Every structure is written in C-alpha cells, then in structure tokens.
Amino acid sequence: MKEKVIEKILMLLAFSAIGVLLLMAIFIFKEGIPIIFKAGINNFLFSTHWAPTKGYFGIFSMIVSSLYVTIGALIIGVPLALACAITLAELAPLRLTVILKPTIELLAGIPSVVYGFLGVVLLVPLIRDYLGGPGLSLLAASMILAIMILPTITSISIDAIQAVPYSYKEGSLALGATHWQTIRMVILKAARSGIITAIILGMGRAIGETMAVIMVAGNALKLPSSPLSPVRPLTSNIALEMGYAAGDHRAALFATGIVLFVFIMVFNVLANIITKRWQQE
Amino acid sequence: MATRINPLISQRVVKAQLWGLTGFTIAILFFIICFVSIKGLPQITLDFLTTNPGDMGRSGGIFSTIMSTLYLIFIALMIAVPLGIGAAIYLTEYTRESRITYIIRFGTECLAGIPSIILGLFGFAFFVMALHLGWSILSGGMTMSIMLLPTIIRTSEESIKAVPYALREVCFSLGVTKWQTVTKVVLPTALPGIVTGVVLSIGRCIGETAVVLFTAGSSLRLPQSFFDSGRTMAVHFYILAREGISMPNAYGTATILIFSILFINLCAYYLMRQFLKKYAIFG
Amino acid sequence: MSAKVIVKDLNFSYNHQRVLSSINLTVEANSILGIMGPAKSGKTTLLRVFNRLCDLIPNIHIEGEVFLDEENILRPDIDVDKLRKRVGMVFDKPVPLPRSIFENLAFGPKLHGIKDKNRLEELVEKSLRLAILWDEVKDRLHESALKLSGGQQQRLCIARTLAMESEVILLDEPTYGLDPVSTLKIEEALQSLKRNYTIVLVSNNTWQVARTSDNVAFLLMGELVEYGSTHGVFTVPKDKRTDDYISGRFG
C-alpha cells in the first residue's frame, strides 16, 4: 500500500520535472512564434533592419555576428584545446595529468562576468592600441569565448583520446612509427567522433554565452566588416533590450531566443549524426 | 624537390609546441586568478564581508549580496534537489527503458543546453511578469532551479545506476520492499555522486548572472523576505564593473566569487573521488 | 517424508522464449534437493521461481502451480515480500551489503519489524553459528563485511538468510569460485542445516551435487529429464542423457 503511494509520488516528481521543462519550451514558443509570422519569416531571419519600436524585426546582422563570434572562438580555441588535450592525454606522465586536467576544468568555473571584465580591462585596450578600432570588437569576443570554451573541449577530448584502445597505439609503435606519428595518424583518427562532439559542445556554449560577450563585443547593430568591428550577437541583443521591451518588441526577443535555441539544437543533431557516421566506419 | 625532415626531429618540434600551448593555457588560468586576487584580496576584510554596500556600491561591503546569493541558492536547491533526485529515482528504479524514458532523457539533454539568457528571458516573462512575483529572490530561485534540474537529474541518475544490480537483488531476496531498498541501500551508496552533482550546481548558482539579473533584480538592500528583490554577488560585480563604480570593490567581489567557486569545485572533486573509491570495492 | 514444495506442470518463458517446460517435482521437507544440468538449462530460472525473483525479469509468462506448504505461490495476489522472508536465497557471487557484519545480518529482520536489540543479537549469533562463521567473526561483528574473504562472505550471505528464519533456502552455485576449504565448510553447514530447513541447491558441479544432496533433479534445456534420490540417479540413471551428463560426455 505504502509502496504504491510512494511510487505515485515519485512519478509525480518525475513528471513535474519534465513538465516544468516542457512548460518553458511551450511558453517560449507561444510568445515568440506569432511575431515571426507577423514579420514574415524571411524578413525576420534575413533582414538587417532591427528597429523593434518602429516595427522592424530583422535579426540577420545578429545571426551573422553570433556565427562569426562562434567561428572565431573555434579558430582560436580549438587548436589550443586540442594541444592541451593531446599533451595531457598522451605526452604528460599520469601523475601530472591527474593534477592538470582538473586544473583546466577549473577555468570553466570562473564566472563569465569575470571573463568579460578582464576582457574589458586588459584585452580591449590591447586590441585598440595595437590593432586599431574601438577595441570592443568581434575579435575581443572571440578571444574571450575561446578561453571560456577551452575547458569543455579539452576535457571531453582528453576522455576521447584516453578511450582509444591501447592496442592501436601499441600496434602503430610496433610498426616503427614515432610517438607523434602515432598520435597524428592513429589515435586522433580513432578519437575523432569524441573530439568532434567536444568541439560542437563548445560551439553550443559559445553561441549561448551572454555576459562576457556583452562586455567586450561593442554591441553595434551592424554587420561586421572586419574582426575589429563591434558586433551584437543574438544573446547580447536579448540581454540588452529585455529590461525595457514590451509587446511586440518583447515577443521579438522571444523569437530571437527561439532562433538561438534552434541553432543549438542543430549543432547537437549534427554532432549526433557525425558521431554515428564515424562510429560506423 | 621536397626534403624529408627526420620524423624524430619534427616530433620534437611538435611536442615542444604542444607543451608550449598547454603551458600557455595553464598560465592564462593562473594569470586570471592572480590578477584578480592581487587587486581584490586587500579589499577583503571582515568589514567588507559584513557591511552592506553603501552609496550605490561605492563604499561599504558586500554583505547583502552575500545573503541574497545564499537565499537564492537555498530556493533553487529546495526546488531542484527533491524534484531532480525524485525524478532520477523514478526513472532508474521504477521504470524500464522504453520510448517514454528515451524521450524524457532526450528532453533533459536538450534543456541542459539552453543558454542562460533564454532562461532569464523565460523567468522574466513568466515568474516576474505573468505570475506577478516581480523581481524577487523567489523568481530568481525558481528560474535558477530550472537551470539546475537537468544536471541534477543526470548526475543522480548516473550515480544511482552505478550501484551494482546485485545489491538490489539481495535486498529483494530478503523480502525488502523496493522503497526500502532505495532508501536503505541504493541511495546511501549513490550519495557521494548525487551530492557532487548538487555541489557543482551550487557553483553554477554563484557564478550565474544572466538568469539572476533579469529575475531577482538588483536591489542593494538586504532582502527581508523571499519576495524582495536582491542582488547576488555576481550581479553586483557585473554592475560595479560595467558602471565603473568602484574598481577596488569590484575586484574584491570578483575575488570572493572566484574563490568560493574554486572551493566548491574542489569539494565536488574530492567527493567524486570518494564515490569512485567506494564503487571500486564492488568493481 | 512430507513435501515442502511441489511443482506442478510449470512452464516458463520470457521474451517468447521457452525456458522451462512441464516441470513436475517435489522438494521434501528437511532435505537437500540438488538441481544439476549444463549451462542454460533453466536451473537458475527454476530456482528463482521458488522465491518469485523471476518477477524481476521483463516479459515473462508462467503457467502451472508451485505449492509451498499447500499454498500456490504463483498466484498474483501473493505477498511476495512475505514469501521471500520464508524462502531465502544465496547467489553465486557473495554480495555483502556495504555495512558491518552485524548490520548485514540484522538488515532483513529489522526491516521486517524486529526492533528488540536482544532479539537481534540472538538472531545474529544463531545464524552465524549455523553458517559455521561465528568463531571467525565473533570479535569483529561491527567491522565492515567487505573485509571478509570470499568464502567468509559467502557464509555471511548464508547466515543472512538464516537470520530471516526462512523455511526454505535456495542456493545458486554457492561455492562457485571459492577455495576448497570454504567449499567444504559450506557443504558441511548445509548438512547440519537440513535438519531444520529445506534446501534447494543448484550446481554445475556434479560432484558437489552427488556429495551433498539427498535428491537430485537433472535439467536439460528446460526439460526435467530425470528426478529421484541421489543414490538412485547416480548409480542407475534411467535416462541415457542423464548417464551421458554424469559421465561427463557433455555439459
């Protein structure tokens, strides 16, 4: 008897948990979808004219900015992350790895606002003085994001590399390949899908990051003409205008959120497909 | 004609580069921590920690922000922990793998990836506006609990699944009921893993800004009830930094932020090692 | 000799695969029934029907009846928890609970309502003596059970079912992987236990079955090929397949 009651309570908890998450998804879509159709989906996604108070809801420049910032973060961050991953997984003695891996993961614990702040105080002036432009730029955002996603990519890549069966490595070395050749031609290939997953996870986090980006990206509503241009990605737009948006304007922000969410979903699905395809090989 | 470089030499070059990049990365971490601490530690006196901010944050300490942060964490955990662990128990112990559990798990994964700004947007529109809770610790805590839920469910599930099936069989064979098995054997064994997940969640709460700013507001006063608005340490730091109000105070707040999160992550790491040790016995 | 457990026309399948076909046998009270047969013959499944642990397997289909003292335990309205108090089980690998030796034994009785400290201590001592483990652990009852050796842990598991004061004890390959000394101690314990308990022992090891049991059942691919007194079956097997199995031609 008591058992049945407990089972029902647990089921309630489980469905509440899921229900809450579902509620949120439905709410966001309910708020945001109508405005997309009102403004016209083509207009919404591909127009660069964003003047919400006057009825213009084109988020194209923001989409482009988000993508550039993310790609920039990957260009800077992935080589660094992979270097760390290879070093810790293959080159460093185990005792060192055991200390250093969590250390790098600690980077992930630093609040995004601190990253943004340091970006403003240290990085932006450097860019402004040595490279030109206002300093608050696409470049600054990409660099900060690169450091922020580095721990994620490194950590998962280390796991992927360590998961490669030792026999692969042994076999390659036995054939006379050097350690680096083994890493390059055998281990990295075998760890491919894990590393790609790591990178895509990093992408998801980069495109979703708000606070650090707001502080260093410049927030200009134009399509970026160079890495030194100030930009306003999707996340920044939502954060900057949320405080005073009402009615259609607020709905447009929800719609922006939906677009953001769709991008992240696409990344995740891509990750799954790529992983599956490479696992089949 | 291309010259072939001796692979052993190119290997040395590559390895040096790899080590260099790794060292560079770790140097960045230490640089960040040192830079902030050096500027911030002088600020951190007992006074700083126990006085409320005055003059928009230009003077005084950060006491009210510390309390707001703690209140927020309290509400978030009060909701997310029972819900999350309960859901995890139900999914692992009371159901079999089926289409439904697959969908639930997929949904949880998706929602784990939602950017915090969207959560903030939702919290604002739903709790602050639609439910008329206004900017409050309550709104902030409830929105934060949504952010923590997927993580707590996932870590709890994994910890519970790690408990060997044989232990459950033994309990059943002794005529022990399912709930008794869960509470007396499964949960205690899975506890370190579950607690690690909760502890890591606390770390996220402390550092989170986007969600909190738009739901709990930024009132500098010490909240008298959960319906009051309150400014967490992270939000306080953001405002101090953005408005350039007080650099020393900003650095001080940032130092507290970083060190409390570092401390929490260390606790979580230590707990995880305990869990793995216990599990290894059953190996 | 009276019958403790009677199996009538038992058919068992899961996921549409037939595992047991038309099993009919009787387990005499205060005796040891050995169930032998090659791997995958359904021995463990049959054992698990006796304490309804088979319920944990998904998609099962059972037909037939199993009587424990005149009560059909396959009826859906049977209180399974109470049944498992009466029918205890020891598994092929020792699985101590992550607790002290004392707590391992007191675990079941406590959850079934026994709170009196003296009674619990009595039960613990009695079960440990019956399992021939008392002398080895009496000075460290509050140490972790995980520190015991494999053989000791298995005897602890036997003691655990004894602490429940079950009437029937089921053992699934109890000495699998244990050293000969522990094995002997366990077989010894079973011999003295059968005076007060009814025991069903599943074993891949025909020697062990021959040594310990009073009656034996030979299962082959879900079918009960032969059943009778151990002496009878091992000296003059009625079925050729039994003869082959005993002489080691397969299995």
Image (spheres, coloured by chain):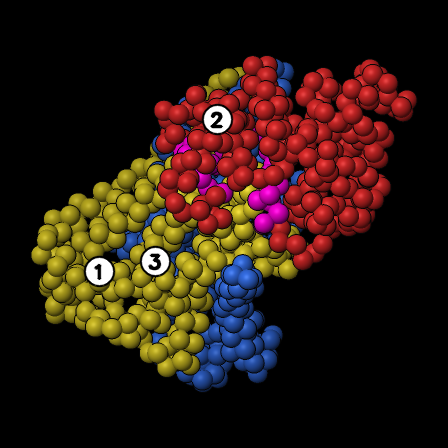
Residue at image x 59%, y 28%?
C193
Give the mark toward the camera: 1 or 2: 2
Compared across the picture, whether B250 is left or right of A62 comes to left
Please indicate, yes or no, whether residue A210 appears anywhere in the rendered image: yes
Q: Position of residue B109 (x, y in %)?
A: 54, 56
- The chain identifier of the residue carrying mark 1 reads B
SS at mark 3 in the image: helix
Q: Which mark is residue C108?
A: none
Lower sequence index among marks 1 and 3: 1
Q: Which chain is red?
A: C
Marker count (numbered): 3
In the image, which lettered chain appears blue?
A: A
In the picture, the disc for residue B66 is 1
Residue at the spot of label 2: C129
- Is B120 inside the magenta-drawn segment? no
Asked if the stretch drawn in magenta spans residue C97, the answer is: yes
- Decide: few, some or many residues near mark 3? Use Cα within 10 Å; few <14, some 14-19, many ≥20: many
Q: Colour of chain B?
A: yellow
Query: What's the amino acid at mark 1?
Result: Ile
Along the line of sight, the residue nearer the viewer: C31 or A176: C31
Residue appearing at x 62%, y 54% in the figure:
C79
Mark 1, Cα crowd under 10 Å, few <14 / some 14-19 / many 20+, is many
Q: Which residue is mark 3?
A: B205
Closer mark to the observer between disc 3 and disc 2: 2
Q: Which x, y percent locates residue B241?
A: 23, 61
Q: Residue at x 66, y 54 (%)?
A: C78
